[in-house]
Image: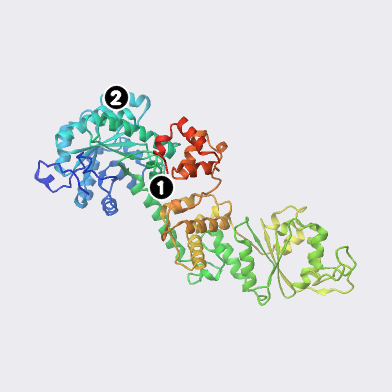
Amino acid sequence: MSRTISAPSTDRNAGAPAPLGPGSQRDQPRFIVGAAIGTGMAAQSATRGGADFLIALSAGRMRCIGEPSVAAMLPLRDSNEFVLSFARSEILPRATVPVYFGAASFDPRLDLRELVERIARAGFAGIANFPTSILIDGQYRAFLERSGVGFGRELELLAVARERGLSTLAYTHTAEEAAEAARQGADIVNIDLGWNVGGVLGAVSHLRVEDAGLMVNAIARQVRAVSRKTRCLVEGGPIVSPRQLEELCQIARVDGYIGGSTIDRVPSESAIEVVTAAFKAIGVRQKADGLDARFNPRRFPRPLWGHSQAAETARALFNRLMSTDYPVVIAGEPGSGRREIARALHRFGPRQARDMVSLPCANQGAERLRLDLFGCMAGMHPSAVKHRLGWLEIVHASSLMLDDVEEMPPEVQRALLDAVEAGSFWRHGGETPSPLNVRFLAVARQDLRHLPDEKVDPRFAEWLGCFTIVLPPLRERSEDLPSLIDESLRIIANRRQGEPKSLDPAAYRLLSAHHWPGNLRELDSVLEQAVLACPSGVILEQHLPPLGAEAAAAPRHFSSEKEWILHGLKKNRFRRSQTADYLGISRKTLYNKMRAYGLQSAAGPEGE
């Protein structure tokens, strides 16, 4: 990758990396990436990743402190001295690419030429106007401009830098600002979309990638109309990951990207969360119930994995019950793994030699369920033309799982409890009792003892629900997510006879932010689809299926028809035939709508 080298005028600058000057279009990189950072470690990592230049920013340092980037706009310290202090000691000594200095010009007492000279002698290749007034609007912005310390003064700073032989990078937000910066000779115009929305400390913004792409494309066209040498880059707003940048570049033609929070904060937040949770998942805190750090999690069913208090409580009770013959209720939301735990209790219990049988209790009439349980003698019921065995007899010496047990009619509950207390039961119309030798396991949505008496007989609830394993929903045990994901990926890999795939931190953040109404069942489905869509060993954001109630391809789910059309184009990578099929309209209708909404330039000549 060739760069135009501006000859430095001092010995100290002689060893500095070459600035990214305008040069000829032929010599310019096709797509350049800058990293706006605040530490030497971030500088090294970004450079190893292929960054073409670095920007030492006060906002980058604020992010490392744990503050949001916007803190750089507050009068907390002298921004220029702040940047000089960490950039000279950490970034410049480790830089192998050009480093721009984020210079503040708000102070009316500041001598711009003296500041630029200090920056040049320190060894910086260029200057960027940051903190910048473009991130301020309203009356305060107008006051800054009238006072002579707004965007005009920032352009004056960049002009002094050009005279000194430094490369210049102009932060801009509007088409007017971008065009004026290009007109005055800025080497790079950065179209800033505002503070990034991603991660824990991200800003709140309603700007969509599609709308941002249209806006950036219009601004970039104006810049190129003013100067063919100025490079147009984009930064901020809804661009949180490479996926969003790729979507924007399908709409807008830009020369590169600058990453701040998206390079040093968002990835760090995700990676640190994932790694910390993984380390925590290795050991198990010692508990009074005898589960110590030596326990093997594979001894327990997967729904009980994790280190949340609820998971540990449920696992401890499972550990005490699995070798007993007690009746057990597993309570929890659908999809949380209740049946898997019931099967594990049977598998580890004293009746494991015989298969467990499941009896659905929902949507069953009382008479039908009574016949299913107790059986009937021939001729004693219209459906019994011969002797009919009940499940209590068939499952002799084994386990019977009562599925959705809270839906069992109260009169059947009382009949079953009477049989348990007597130790025997009668077939309908029978003359002699049959011995009852069954272990009862039950699945319910909640603890039976918390249901009203008209729903569940209190005596029945006290007997069957004496031992209840409560499974919390997945949304309430986020600290358990890493171990559950790893095990699910391992199971999927075994089924596919391949190596388990890993999860990119950005993809993990999406999963951890999801509400998981379908619990473990939904998690398994999402990961199964992601593994199928992922061609490599690392699952990225774009490999995940839509999470939650994503809007379907119908116009009523979007705020406008234009948004619906653009969504369809983006979804199908701007292939018009596929988009028309996806939206359920003819190709001619799609062309007409694209023309009406000005989307033809976004899709390219044919979009195929």
**Could you tell me the amino acid type at mark 1?**
Arg
Q: Is residue 533 left or right of residue 352?
A: left
**212 relative to 50 in the view: left or right:** right
> Which color scheme is applied?
rainbow
| Disc number placed over residue 117 in the picture, else none | none
Number of residue marks: 2
Which of the 4 image quadrants contains residue 462? bottom right
Q: Position of residue 595 (x, y in %)?
A: 45, 32
Q: Nearer the viewer, residue 310 or 226?
A: 226
Residue at position x 85%, y 73% in the image: 433
Q: What amino acid does circle 2 point to?
A: Glu
Left or right relative to 407: residue 179: left
Task: Look at the numbered discs 1 and 2 and tell me whether their residues touch, using CB distance below 8 Å.
Answer: no
Q: Is residue 104 above or below residue 415?
A: above
Q: Say whether disc 1 or disc 2 marks the residue closer to the N-terminus.
A: 2
Element carrying mark 2:
helix
Could you tell me if residue 149 is visible in this image?
no
Q: Quadrant of the C terminus?
A: top left
- Which residue is painted at 57% across and 36% down in the image? 556
Mark 1 or 2: the one toward you: 1
Question: Which one is in front, 284 or 196?
Answer: 196
Distance from Cα at disc 1 to Cα at disc 2 = 37 Å
Residue under circle 1? 243
* Horizontal side, residue 97 vs residue 488: left or right: left
Residue identifier under label 2: 145
Percent x, y of residue 12:
11, 46
Give whichever of 319, 410 is nearer the camera. 410
